[in-house]
Structures are given as structure tokens and as C-alpha cells.
Image: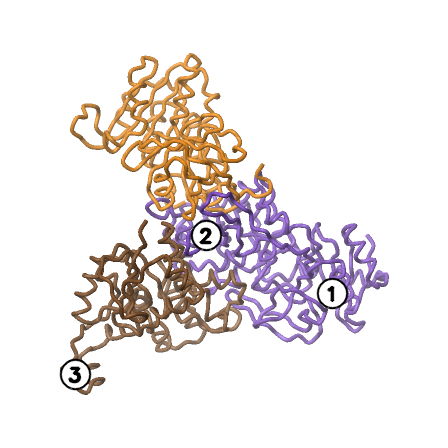
Amino acid sequence: MSTPTLGVWKFTSCDGCQLTLLDCEDELLALAGQVRIAQFLEASSAVVGGPYDVSLVEGSISTPDEAERIQRIRAESRVLVAIGACATAGGIQALRNFADVDEFRSVVYAAPQYIDTLATSTAISEHVDVDFELRGCPIDRHQLLEVLTAYLAGRKPDLPDTSVCTECKRRGLTCVMVAHGTPCLGPVTHAGCGALCPAYGRGCFGCFGPMTNPNVPALTAQLRVLGMAEDEVDRVFRTFTVSSFERER
Amino acid sequence: MWTAEPMLPVRYRVTDRRAETADSATLWLEPVDEPLPAIEPGQFTMLYAYGVGEVPISVSGIEDDTLVHTIRAVGAVSRALHAARPGTVIGARGPFGTTWRVADAIGRDLVVVAGGIGLAPLRPVVVAALDLRPSFAGVTVVAGARAPEEFLFRDELDDWAKRDDLELRLTIDKPAPGWDGPVGFVTEPLAEVAVDPLRTVAFLCGPEPMMRFSANLLLRKGVPACRILVSLERNMKCGVGLCGHCQLGPALLCRDGPVVDYAYAEPLLSVKEL
Amino acid sequence: MSTATIDVDGLGRLIDVLAADGYQVIGPTVRDGAIVLAELDSVDQLPSGWGVEVGPGEYRLRKRADTAMFAHSAGPQSWKQFLHPAHRKLWSTDAEGNGFVPAVEEVPKYAFLGVRGCDLAAIGVLGGVLAGGRHPDGSYVRRRPLFVVGVNCTEPGGVCFCASMGTGPAVGPGYDLVLTELVDDDGHRFVVDVGSAQGRRIFDRVPSREAPADEVGLAQEAVASAAGRMGREMPATDLAEVVRDSRESPLWDDIAARCLNCANCTLVCPTCFCTTTEDVTDLTGEHAERWQRWSSCFELDFSYLHGGEVRTSGASRYRQWLSHKLGTWYDQFGGSGCVGCGRCIAWCPVGIDLTAEAARLSAAAKGSVDVDR
């Protein structure tokens, strides 16, 4: 088998997820030995043309240009992996989906006439077929390595579509909601972070977005029992994966 | 022999491979180390493809220490096993699960009903019946496939078709060029089979709806549910009753199945999402 | 039965003796706002003066007026985490085909201190699953030689129902030593019963005095009265039959409307044993490993079968959990999967109560409630 090529692509995002690849310090050399990095502007300005065996796509689609560019990348990619809350849910910038983008434009920018933007910020999967999604803001480096090693081995990557609670309990952590009364989105949030926030005594804020078939209304009722006011409940679901959670509420 | 580490495979080497259809192949596997205990028709092993994972696969042939498995490529692991060529080392654990209890059917009429890849677990039943042919009253095989080229063991089916001591009825899902046999589900040719309910033992394997329809047809023909055997499938991770995945109501199918009788299976299969 | 009494120093001495004998002593201690199970070096780590207030979906540490160390009911963890680890390597292999090498596990010699009746029963149920069949789990078998210091329960919690499951409040057979804690004007002490030869061998090295009859009487009364102070009760009926008769009950949808499918109940349950496997390779592809981790019937892909999951609805997943725990466990392993510890009720983030749901199913199966609500 010839060395597979890897492309890393950026759409509307902060670059934090692609940087997770550079964060894989211990594995980076081994990775460089197994894949040819053909396109990764955060790491190198050298660019090799497609097609690409694996494309990691960061960011949401929020401009007309991006909506076209993602089609080209899909066409050139054998396996396309959407990485991060922006690419898998539209990101924090999807707050605009629930507001008037023209109003935002006029408030935020000094010269709004130069801003060419879509009314919505959407996930990659709303535009093209996506083979795998790595959730989170930012993504988890273990999950990134899993998707790459699984690709190299021909394996289905282990990206459990379960609650954060499953990871929390396997770590032996004490539930912050039951024992401390701290609101936590863990019971409806897609696993993958290793229960990072509960490990520090904080409630999960849902940056991995909802798991499949979450019971968000039931959790919302419990958040109210814990004393959250209606606007607080709204705010807790309207962060990095706002568009995904709004669909489940 | 599994007392210490029931999850630890032993090595087997692929010594022969025969493509059956576009997406299925039969593998012959020779032990590299100590062979597993003898496997019986209806049982399965857990086969491991290096770096990819492990899946349960029913035995499709009984040949001393050689494991014979027919694998359809449907997921990552079965694709990797399907792609394995002679020389490839894979892992195997087993044998696990219940058997078709062919010996209990001696003296009776055998009715074998298979859908698609379901013919693989049933092949050893037919082979055993033909080996002991005078011991059985009648042997009928009804097999269905999506298309003519989707039948497993086609050379063997041709041989069976020529025998006068075996009634073979094949059907395909929709009309296909060059096919002059019946078209439709296995229940159609099965309906035409003359069944003596007092003497019949039925062996069913295929998609769950196919088994349910076939079993109900046989029940209507008067075959008692306890003499209709079905091979059931659920997710399996361990094969040894330790992981909990293969539950179907009261059954742990890796231990209490895969082969169960329809009197046991019917009330379970009739409940949605059990 | 020889009964003796030790004081807090004596309990400390017991921990020392066990440690000197090579045991890793595990017992209750306060951490992160809960009473968890951890390795103990000293009696000072026990949760002296701490109690808990427990209800459905709620658990709070409470300071007690006395110095009692075992006056708390089940916490977020169970002994399962030591006997059936949440994540462990099974074996490794390589691309050269050199064979499968079982993972080497450093298994300590465990002494469990403070095991309740419900939890000792749970250890037995878990053992029945993992070591009672044709293919015993080697890892469990290696961990199983235990030294058990039981504690008779004198302070049941708000979600406890061991009395109705027949597993407590008194610790059943299987302990090496069992303590009954007494704290009153006569001091803080523990009435000790010896349950095994290994218990005798250890206890002989702990300074004790013979327990006077009135002290033994006090201890027995405290345990007996606990049976009447359970926060919950499982309906006294043939639950296996209720479960069989409830497969098509509309109540599952009613529960599913509240259930989060988060899997907490199964993970805190001391007998839930389900696991899944992970296949791991390194980037070079030269090495591969297989791992095992706790899994749950609430996970969507638990029932995955080429093409889709069998149990997609929340109703079917809750039905699987309750039916297995209270009903089909009998078919599979010859007893109930529930010991009445109440963890699934306390640690359910929305407080779904297994005993209440079992009672409703039971009533509905008998036709005595209107299930349409």
C-alpha cells in the first residue's frame, strides 16, 4: 500500500481543532512516517494536490464560498472526517441561525457591505457526506489518533455514541449533579472527552453536542428542579453546539 | 481449555479460500498452535482479523482440525476476514453455542430452509444428512438468494440437485436473466413441499422475518414448534456469556443459542426491540 | 459464635494487621463530596462523623452528631470496580503473527473493609455471572480471593431496600469478619463476629475483649431495627413473572419519557457486568491490542447488528435493563440481579425509582391499575 495522503482543511473556525494534531507530540513522528501530509497550512506551507486519502475538515460552512469549496474537497477525498463542534454542529457561530444576521453584521463590522456571509452557520454534514465526525470544542486528541490509526488498520474507529456519564462512571468520578447539585449536560452529551469537566468538579457544558436519541426534555426538567431559571436553561444549551441541541429540545 | 482466559484467541492460518459470491468467501483455517476443541454443526467461533476486530461466524463445514467458515463482507471485520488470503494468520476462539442436534433427527424427515448467507450454518446439516443418508427418511433443502449468482456453494448445490435422495428447491428474490426456477421468498417453494408433520424436523437460518414466516408456515402444516429449529443472531462481543450483548429476553444467545427451537424463540421474536 | 468487641484503635490495628499480611485494604472514605471506596492506610481515613442523605437523584454528605464511621448507605461506587475493572487490557499481538499474549495483571490481595449485606450479596451475584459458568473470567477469578470485613447496617438510607431483597441489613454468609458499629455513652466500639478460619487468623492479632451479652444485644437490636427503616421496598411478588407479562406494557413508554438513556443506573449497579471490547493498533500497525470496558444496555450500539440497532427506542432499552435485573437474570443465572442497594435510584440524574417502576409494572400486570393514565 502506498503511503496515504492526509489533508487538513479549515472553514469557519478558530484553528484549535487542527492544532490538536500538532498537540499529538508523542505520536507526531510516527504519524509522519505513516501518512503524507499533503495539505496542512497550520504546519507547513507546502501543498500537494489531491486526491487525498483522508481529509480532516475543521470549521463550519458560513459563506457562499465555503459552501462551494467543501464540495470540491469532498470530491477529492476518499475519507472525510469532520472535526470539532464547528464542523459537526455549526459551532458557536451558529447562534446567528437563531437571530437576524443582518443586524449582527451591522453591529459587529465597521463596513458591513464587505461581509459576504450566509444567514446560517452549518455543519459539514449538511452539505456533503461525512464519513466520521469528531465532536468537541476542541476535539479530543485520543479520538483523533483513534480515527487515524483505525483508518490505517482498516478498522471502524471506536467513537462511542453514548453519554458522557459512561466515561465519568468508568473513571470512578462522583456525579456532580447528584452529589453536588451542579447542573450537568453529561447525560445527553456525546461521549469522547473522557468526562473532562466533571473530573474538575464542573458540570459538562455539552461541547461534544447531543448523543443520538438524547432525552433533552427530561434533562431540562431536572435542570429546573436544580433551580435553573428558564433563561439559564436556554443559555446552557446555546453554546458551542447550539444548533444540534436546539433540534433536540 | 478456556478456563484461564476465555477472551484469548489461538492462531489459525488461512490455507484455502474459495470465493462464493461477490461478497462472500469460504475460508479453510488450519491451527498454528493447539487446535480448538471439535466444533459441531450450528456452533460458531469468534474470528479475529488483525487490528480490526472480532466477529462471531458460524461453522460451514466440519473437517477434523480444520475450521471452515463462510464469511460475507458486511462490516469492517467481516470485510477483513473476507479479504484474507492463504497464509494470513487470524485469531479464533470457540467453539461456542448450541448445535443443530442432527443426531436427534435420525429417522425423521429433514426440512432445511435457508435464506442468503443462512445456507452457510446449515450446510453441515445437509452434509451430515447425506453422509448418514439411510438414517433419515427424507431430506429437503429450500434455499433462497437475492439473485442466481448470490447462492453459496453453487457446485455443491448442482450436485445436490442431481441426487434423487434429496429434494432441492431454489428460489431467487426477483426475476433474473437465465433463471427459469421459482421467483419469490422461500416460503413459496416451502409451501409446496409435502411435509409429514409427525416425522419432520425443520432447520431454519436466514433473516429473522424469513425464519418467522417459514416457521409459521411449518406450524400451519402441523410441524410442532419444538421440532422447528432456528439459528438466531444478536450482537456478540465475547461468545462466552460474559459481556451481556447477545441477550434476547431470557436467552444469552452465545450460550443458550444460536440454535433454539421455535417454541422458545416465537414469543421472543414477536416482541419488537426485545 | 464467638463475639468480641474492639474500639477504634482496635479497628486501626485490624487495618495494620491486614496490611502487614500483604493485603491492600479498601474501604470507605470521603472524597469529592461523597463517600467513595479507596485504599486505606489508617483508620483516620474512614468517614468518621459523616452520614449521607439520599433520595432519588440526590445524594448529600451530612455531618453527624457522633463519630460513626459506617453510618452511611451505598455511595457512587461499588466493589465491582475492583473485581471487574472499568477498563482493562485483555491481550496483545503483532503483525508478524507471533501469537496472542494475555495481559499481565498485577492483582493485589484485596481486603474489603466495610462491606454491607447488599454489597456482599452483589459480590456473590457478580461472581455467579463472571465465574459461575462454563467460561470463567480469568481476571475476576484472580481478583476473587478476598478478605471481607463486613459491616452490619444500622443506618439504612432513603433509597435502600435490601430488607425486601433478602440481602440485609445483616451481612449474610461469606464474610471473614463482620462488625456492628455502636456509638453511645459507653463509647465508640465494634462488636465483631468471626466468620472464617482466615478471619480468625487475622482477628487473633487484634486486641479485643469479650463482648458482654448486653452489648451483643444492643448490636442485634440496632441491626434488627434497621430492617424497619428502609427508605424503599421492592414489591413482594414474582418479579420474573411480572417481567415476562410486561413485555408489551405501555408503561415502558411512560418511563422512557423520563429516562435519559445515560446508563448511570447500570454503571453504578454492583452487579451489572456488561462489557464491550476495543481494538487498538499503534500508528505503525505493528502492534495490536484488545481491551475491555464497561458497557451498558442503554448504549445505542450495544444491540448493533449489521445494518442497525435492535433496541433503538428508550423504552426498549429501559425494558431491557429492568427486565434483566429483576426477571431474566433468574433464567440466565438462577437468581435476581438486584440486591437492593438503591444505587440506581440515587445516581439516576432524574431519580427514576426501580422499586416504584417495578410496583407499577406489577400492579399493571395484575390488572389493578389503569395503565393509560
Residue A249 location (% of width, % of height)? 32, 66
Q: Quadrant of residue B48?
A: top left
Q: Residue at x 20, y 77 (%)?
A: A101
In the rendered image of the structure, the colour used to display chain C is purple
Crowd rating for badge 2 (residues with CA inside 10 Å; few <14, some 14–19, many 20+):
many
C-alpha gap between disc 2 and disc 1? 44 Å
Same chain for mark 2 and mark 1? The answer is yes
In the rendered structure, find residue C278 and report the number of the disc placed on it. 2
User: Which amino acid, by three-letter code, is at mark 3?
Assistant: Pro
SS category of the residue bearing label 2: strand
User: Residue type at mark 2?
Assistant: Glu
Q: Name the foreground residue: B25 vs A171.
A: B25
Residue furthest to the left: A113
Cα distance between the residues tagged 1 and 3: 74 Å
Residue at the extreme bottom: A110
Residue C181, labelled with which disc? 1
Residue under the point 20% across and 85% down: A109
**Chain given the colour brown:** A
Q: Residue at x 79, y 60 (%)?
A: C217
What element does badge 1 sit on? Answer: strand
